[in-house]
Image: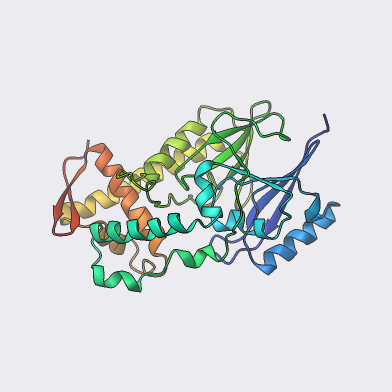
Amino acid sequence: MAKETIYPIVVPTPFAVGNVNMYLVKTDSLTLIDAGVKTEEAWQAFKHQLAEIGYEPADIEQVVITHHHPDHVGLLDYLPHSALVIGHPKARPWISKDPQFLAWHERYFHRFLVECGLEPASLHRLPSFRRSLRYSCERSLDIEVLEGEVVDGLPGWTVLEMPGHAQSHIVLYCEKDGRMIGGDLLLATVSSNPMLEPPDEGEDERPKPLLQYNDSLRKLLRYKMTRVMAGHGRDVTDVPPLVERRLARQKERAEQVWNMLQQRPMTAFDVCRELFPAVYEKEFLLTMSEAVGQLDYLEQLGAVMKEKEGNSYVYKAVAMR
């Protein structure tokens, strides 16, 4: 078995999060973990760094995607189709831009946002989620991986499912030395955003990403973690204390929302506008995901109750346990 070498590759993105990290893993085969964003600038930066370590895109045999967000999959469209694409099954409709799935996504969120307190007549003014998909890809998923599985060509690394930031989110964990290639699960300087996604078509119960994300963070504490190679920014080496800080900050934000609801009943959209008055229009999905997540968290605690008023749900504070 060949010695393992991991090369970080950093490419720019057009998003507020800044640069995204990719990882080239050399063993008996050549594996790329995550695939940047689909811009010419990212592609040129990727090729340049790849050449500096002695490779070209055609040498890459497989790509593992930690999740389906555009800044982690876009360059799949530039890579040769001989490279196998590996990821969680829930990434499939996103990276292939399945038209039935995307149509369902829009139908679901139009209905859901009305329940959150938006006026139906205002929905057409919202930024389309499809705008960011221009930075994504249109590739098939060749191999699906689930919890506990091992990817050929990555001996010693195990797939762990870590939903929350995305329903498709996985990480790779090396038990021997406690390293993790973590995508956007745990970032050193900013908290990852648990993003709203629709349920599978035909299902009524939507995922609750903030609750999932908190569970995924707690799951990290069950493993010996020495280093997380993150999707953005520097490596994380203080995993347990950082996880505890992230969970504590989440509790503080939920208490802030609960205090708001003590003043008056509010819809999810009301909460969004009060939490993020300056940016909710520009970053609508991001801020609505945060607002709905906090309400999901409080509802799980039994600290709020919601009632249907007209087309929308209104949340009221009850005793915090």
Which residue corresponds to the image point at 65% horizontal and 63% vertical from the top-left?
A: 12
Q: Is residue 274 above or below residue 316?
A: below
Q: Quadrant of residue 238?
A: top right
- The reply, left or right, for residue 301 in relation to residue 179 is left
Q: Quadrant of the C terminus?
A: top left
Camera-nearest residue between 279 and 89? 89
Q: Is residue 310 above or below residue 27?
A: below
- The reply, left or right, for residue 27 in relation to residue 317 is right
- The reply, left or right, for residue 72 in relation to residue 190 is right
Which residue corresponds to the image point at 37% horizontal and 54% vertical from the top-left?
A: 289
x%, y% of residue 270? Answer: 25, 61
- The reply, left or right, for residue 136 in relation to residue 2 is left
x%, y% of residue 19? Answer: 62, 59
Which residue corresponds to the image point at 58% horizontal and 36% vertical from the top-left?
A: 145
x%, y% of residue 296? Answer: 30, 45
Q: How many marks?
A: 0
x%, y% of residue 11? Answer: 68, 60
Camera-nearest residue between 5 and 103? 103
Q: Is residue 173 above or below residue 183?
A: above
